[in-house]
Amino acid sequence: MEAISIGRRREVFWDDFLIDPQRTTAIPRLVPPVEKECVFLFDREEEVFAVSYPNVVQTEDGYRMYYLSFDPASHGKKKIRMRVIESADGLHWTRPALGLFPAVTPGADNVVIDTMDDSSLCVFCDPNPACPPEAKYKALSLVFLDRATDRRSLWCWTSPDGYHFTRGEMVTDQGRFDTLNATFWENGKYYSYVRNLHGDGAGGIVRDVRVTESEDFVHWTAPVPLSYDDGLDFQMYTNNVMPYPRAPHIRIGMPSRYVERKVWTKNDDQFGSVDRKKHAAETIELRCALAVTDLVFMCSRDGQHFHRYPQAYLTPGMETGINWIYGDCFASWPLTDTGDTYSFYMNKDGMSDAPKKLYRYELRKDGFACRMAEGGERELVTKPLTFEGNVLHLNMATSAFGGIYVQVLDADGEPLSGESVEIYGDSIDRAVYFPDGSDFSAYAGRPVRLRFRMRDAALYSMIFADA
């Protein structure tokens, strides 16, 4: 088996890329985020009707969150506008008084694009050094080329400052695009993860995700469907794919999973939100009453083939009068750095007629998933690898009773070292040493395996660095 070169790269234990499954007994475990505080109230008239697809952009002064609002009284059709709120720390958000469109609905001073074709949005600040200054901010959304024939395209608006947007060029017309089509620049290319559909003729139409790429944001490849290792073909409403900030060679996604039941039953009569469900069925369509959504987690090493956890990363939660309705669990994109943690945001009042509360959700860095040893002792053994640096740093957590010991093995699995000192506590950066005070410098550059002996412990990630 050829050794995997990790150099000084952070590696996570969310998938089996580094793990020898024949020698590992530590259990893969998805770790749900923690709901924190309500950070903003969308209480303007158009926001009360609906708020969709929050996109967070980091700026020199903090963060901006772009989102869509809906005016239900615009000439018999919902008028969709793009708005922005701002924050210095990701915790406290306010509306800027921009006044760019004084003729629109009163209280809409934070509108930055007055008319969008449909409920679809992705906004990012382009880090490409070759990007023209007037196109530094890009907003992508669905545009109908011909409503009569349902011809669609993904179009881009550009802005030098994130406030004054000009409609630019079409990105692609190969897709449906009625979602958050995550788009970003990485390693010299642009990538866009877009909505499309497929069907087998018997099981109905399935919403899917495809990826297209471009070197110049003008010429794009044909979108290629993503593949998954769970063997399931469930519908994904959003995708929220992004490079993971602490390990950008890995892409993560937090897609909303769409589940549509076909028949109303006595179970539906028992939801606290039953009146809202019935209203949606009567005023929109039955699908909007029976469809529900949750959030899942997935990760990829190549951006096309994803390891996807089949269990939910986040569910609508305990039933209330406004949840378990089409539109739950639509997370913001991308992650927001809030110190020792990452945050994302979610509106929990989707199809209600009340002001929309924006909640912050928090997870430890590298903490989407881990390898876990609960109760008895378990092991994690890596495949052969090579590294640079001399000190191993772990993102780990144990109980007071728990602990982790690290041992270096040769490529065949024979011991090269004794075990490290016991590692215990809860830290995103814990250095590992041997009982004599030595480090891992003797093993740098040669093929080795690492053996983690664990008890009541969780292991999230590792990285080699210089002391």
Image (cartoon, helix red, strand yellow):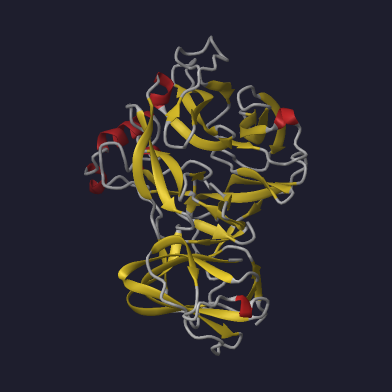
- Residue name at image x 38 percent, y 55 percent: 32
Q: Between residue 35 and residue 263, name the one nearer to us.
A: 35
Q: Between residue 317 and residue 389, name the one nearer to us.
A: 389
| Left or right of residue 128: residue 269 | left
Image quadrant in which the C terminus is located: bottom right
Total marks shown come to 0
* Residue furthest top in the image: 103
* Residue furthest front in the image: 436
Estimate the x, y position of residue 292 in percent, counting from the top left.
Answer: 38, 45
Task: Give residue 60's quadrant in the image.
Answer: top right
Residue 21 vertical placement versus 45 (above, below) = below
Estimate the x, y position of residue 278 in percent, counting from the top left.
Answer: 30, 34
The answer to whether one can see residue 294 in this image is no
Image quadrant in which the N terminus is located: bottom right
- Residue name at image x 58 percent, y 62 percent: 10
Residue 202 vertical placement versus 77 (above, below) = below
Estimate the x, y position of residue 246 in percent, counting from the top left.
Answer: 56, 55
The answer to whether one can see residue 418 in this image is yes
- Residue name at image x 53 percent, y 44 percent: 334
Residue 111 vertical placement versus 207 (above, below) = above
Estimate the x, y position of residue 406 in percent, counting from the top left.
Answer: 48, 78
